[in-house]
Image (cartoon, rainbow, N blue to C red):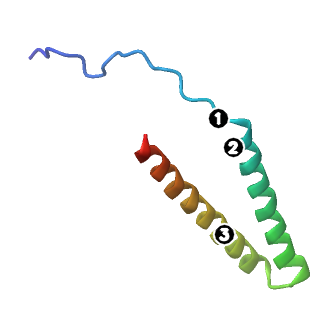
Amino acid sequence: MTVDREAIPQHDDAPADEVSTATVVAYTLAAVVLVGWFLFGWLVLQQGFVDSVGESAGAGFALLLIVSVVGTVRRSRR
């Protein structure tokens, strides 16, 4: 049996868009805020380790969802 085309097409990969410095700073700031939120809940409010992890993880996932929606809207405008 012969195949007229290759199973894995060979194409030139264009370099991906570089991540801006503002994006890296925003992500770093978000990570620092989430770690601070975890430590605040755990050490100051004394709500328990697992509860603090869950709360900060939930806030992180909410931020990721917001970033995803904003990125989708911006990409659809192009």
Mark 3 or mark 2, which is nearer the start of the sequence?
A: 2
Which circle marks residue 59 in the picture? Answer: 3
Q: Amino acid at mark 3?
A: Ala
- Residue positioned 19% across, 16% down in the render: 5
Up-down: is 60 above or below 50? above
Q: Amino acid at mark 2?
A: Thr
Badge 3 or badge 1: first in the primary sequence? 1
Q: Is residue 5 above or below residue 69?
A: above
Labelled disc at residue 23: 2
Mark 2 or 3, closer to the camera: 2
**What secondary structure is found at the residue carrying circle 2?**
helix
Residue occupying the point 78% across, 77% down = 49
Q: Where on the picture, by quarter, is residue 77? A: top left
Task: Identify residue for label 1.
Answer: 19
Locate residue 45, reporting x and y percent.
86, 84
Label 2 to label 3: alpha-carbon separation: 19 Å
User: Where does the C terminus fall, quadrant-wise?
Assistant: top left
Q: Would residue 16 appear left or right of 54 to someone viewing this image?
A: left
Quadrant where the image shows the N terminus: top left
In-image side of 24 versus 32 (left or right): left
Labels 3, 1: front one: 1
